[in-house]
Every structure is written in C-alpha cells, then in structure tokens.
Amino acid sequence: MELLTISKAAKKLGVHPNSLRNWEKQGLIKPVRLPGGQRRYSMDELNRLLQSGQLTDSQEAVVLYARVSTKKQADAGNLDRQMERLRQYARERKFNVKAELTDVASGLNQKRRGLTNVLKLAERGEYKKLIIEYPDRLARFGYSYIERHLRYCGVEIVATAEKEPEDAQSELVRDLLAIVTSFSARLYGARGGKKVRQGFRELIAEASQSEKTEEQQEEAD
C-alpha cells in the first residue's frame, strides 16, 4: 500500500497541508501514524474522501473582510454597506461564508484583529477565498506580502470592485500624514513632528486648490 506524506497528499487533493490537519480534527480523514509521529496518507483514504463529497463545502468556503479607517465612517454605515456588498457577491456565487471579519483602523495598522483572524483561519486551512472590495481594504502597504502568505496557505484573494470609492483618496492622505508624522517625530521630536505634519497638510491643500484652478481655466477655455 502506497503511503503519501502530508505535502504530497495535499498536492493530490489541491489543498494546503493545514486543510488535511483540520479535516483530521473533524474526523473526515484518518492518517496512518509512523512510530515517529509523522502522518502518512493512503491513496485509498484520499479517494474515499474525494468520493464522499464531504470536501465540497470546504473547497468553496470563503471569508469576507471589510475595513474602514475611522469610527466616523463606521457610524455613518460605510462598514455595514461594504460588508453587505461582499455578502451579495458571495450569495450570487453560492459561496459558503466561513466568517465575516471587519476592522475599524488605518490600513497601515498591522495589529488589526480582523486581519489577524484572516491569517489565522488561512493558516488552519479553513477557507479557499478571501473576498474584499479592493486591495487597500486589506492593507495600504505590504499587500503583496499578505497575498503571498495567503497563497502559500492555499487562499486566493478576490477583489470585487474595479475602482476605489471617492473617499479612498482622503483615507490615503490620512495614512500619508500618519507616516510623515511618525518619521518626523523620530527625527525632530514630537513638537517638530507636528510642525512637519502641518506643513504637509498645507502642501496638500495648495496642490488641491491649484488642481481646481486649472480645471476651471480649462472649462473657461
């Protein structure tokens, strides 16, 4: 009888090895244990699992993730509307929603509870797709690293929107201000950081006003 390692068995099934560990806990599959404790899987056991139809829901399981930057946005209903759009997307495609996770925090914040749970569930092999509206909802910077880690866990990121909403630019400005303040505070102290931040705000305001003036001139011409 041919016995496969967990990595080879996972490859045969097209899943992450963590999925096999999770299915073992659920009693869906029973590996052979070697004297050293290593798991081995027989082809008969893998075929039985495939033919049982018990993997269908697991393979289509998804997680919905929504984020807004401020409590004001959440209180205005932006977070709820964002999540409802994701639910609609999942319903239309008959996905099995494993979890709905949200954060009210900056896209620069790496200690978001919702994002942490997104990663934990992926590492346990509990879903196959992460549904978000657009990449900045998941992370402002470092998106490619999160995408790579999730891909390693067997999870595909699906962005449902083709372009960002109008208020995304204001969120980006806030995040840039946070970065500028953080670095300038380290260089010049807290008081100096505030001055740099104020100057940065004034530059943005001047650029916005200049852009509006140019648009008005073009319309006049």
Image (cartoon, grey):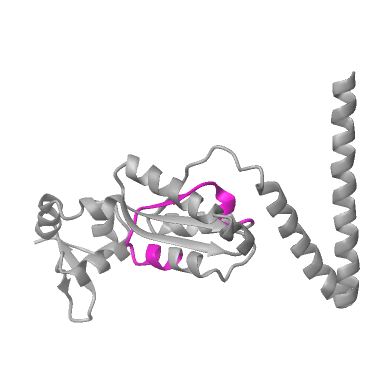
Position of 75 relative to 113 (above/below): above
**Residue range corresponding to the magenta coloring:** 119-140
Residue found 85% across the figure and 63% down from its top: 197
Residue found 9% across the figure and 55% down from its top: 48
Q: Quadrant of the N terminus?
A: bottom left
Residue farthest to the front? 76
Q: Quadrant of residue 16?
A: bottom left
Residue 93 in picture, x, y percent from top left: 32, 41
Q: Nearer the viewer, residue 63 or 198?
A: 198
Residue 129 in the magenta stretch? The answer is yes
Left or right side of 110 for 206: right
Q: Quadrant of the C terminus?
A: top right
Q: Is residue 24 visible?
A: yes
Residue 158 in picture, x, y percent from top left: 45, 46
Residue farthest to the top? 221
Position of 121 relative to 143 (above/below): below
Q: Nearer the viewer, residue 218 or 19?
A: 218
Left or right side of 130 for 218: right
Residue 178 in picture, x, y percent from top left: 75, 64
Residue 39 in the magenta stretch? The answer is no
How many marks overall? 0
Residue 104 in picture, x, y percent from top left: 57, 64
Q: Nearer the viewer, residue 10 or 130?
A: 130
Residue found 87% across the figure and 23% down from its top: 218
Residue found 85% across the figure and 50% down from its top: 204
